[in-house]
Image (spheres, helix red, strand yellow):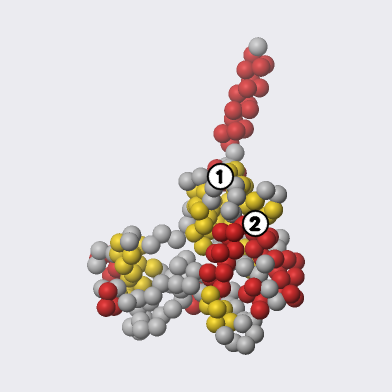
Amino acid sequence: MWGMLRICSLLVLVVLMQPAEAQTLVGTARVVDGDTLQLAGERVRLFGIDAPEAGQTCHDAAGRGWDCGGFATAALVALTASETRCEGQDRDRYGRLVARCYAGKSDIGAALVEAGAAFAYARYSSDYLALEARASAARRGVWVGQADRPEVQRAKGSTEGAPTGCTIKGNISSNGQLYHLPGSRGYGATRIDTARGERWFCSEDQALAAGWVKARG
């Protein structure tokens, strides 16, 4: 009997020691952007890929601009139309669950890269590099012309109209007065309209003193 109790205790301990990131989520997903989902109460970042930012413009072979950010989001919406399963791998610096996600047996990240709706995120994984090469050779999606990689877009952002040295964006939305730091997710897609009371800040202290709140992610 004591042996059985000991085995049960060990099994409970093993379960408790499993990292939260190892969880599996199943359900109907809500798409946030080309590589991010909301599923079962968790914000999920797709593992191994990086999709064009919301509002990002790419260019076709003739140099004409097109909405590659919207294309990536629409592609993810289509792939998650049925039940989605995500298997957690890690958490990123924003607290999002980084996961491989599937629609049936189809790897959603792989499908996005192969369709040219996302890039392989080589900084974190080499898993999808072969699929990216295939999409590039076929000139699918972002490979039809010229496209900045999303991490370049995020770092570059948009600072048009910003006073010298003041690149923090004070944006007004349904979530209130939020400030966005250069390089943060959503920074590049955020536009400042000073006529609406939006503004630029030169430091976080300045933004906080003015009553603005740091945007999540």
Rendered-image quadrant of the N terminus: top right
Rendered-image quadrant of the C terminus: bottom left
The part of the image, by quadrant, that contains residue 173 is bottom left
- What amino acid type should be assigned to the residue bearing mark 1? Gly
The part of the image, by quadrant, that contains residue 170 is bottom left
Element carrying mark 2: helix
Q: Say above or below: 168 vs 111.
A: below
Q: Say above or below: 65 vs 97.
A: below
Q: Position of residue 216 (x, y in %)?
A: 41, 59
| Residue for badge 1 | 27
The numbered disc on residue 101 is: none
Q: Position of residue 189 (x, y in %)?
A: 45, 72
| Residue for badge 2 | 108
Q: Is residue 172 visible?
A: yes
Could you give the CA–CA distance between mark 1 and mark 2, rounded to whole angstroms?
14 Å
- The residue located at (35%, 76%) in the rendering is 192
Using a 10 Å C-alpha cutoff, classify the residue at mark 2 as few (fewer than 14 neighbours), some (14 to 19) or many (20 or more). Answer: many
Q: Is residue 189 left or right of residue 35?
A: left
- The residue located at (50%, 53%) in the rendering is 30
- The residue located at (35%, 78%) in the rendering is 166
- The residue located at (60%, 78%) in the rendering is 147
Q: Position of residue 190 (x, y in %)?
A: 41, 72
* Numbered label tally: 2
Q: Position of residue 63 (x, y in %)?
A: 59, 87
Using a 10 Å C-alpha cutoff, classify the residue at mark 1 as few (fewer than 14 neighbours), some (14 to 19) or many (20 or more). Answer: some
Dot 1 and dot 2 residues touching (CB under 8 Å)? no
Element carrying mark 1: strand
Q: Say above or below: 112 vs 2.
A: below
Q: Is residue 155 left or right of residue 108?
A: left
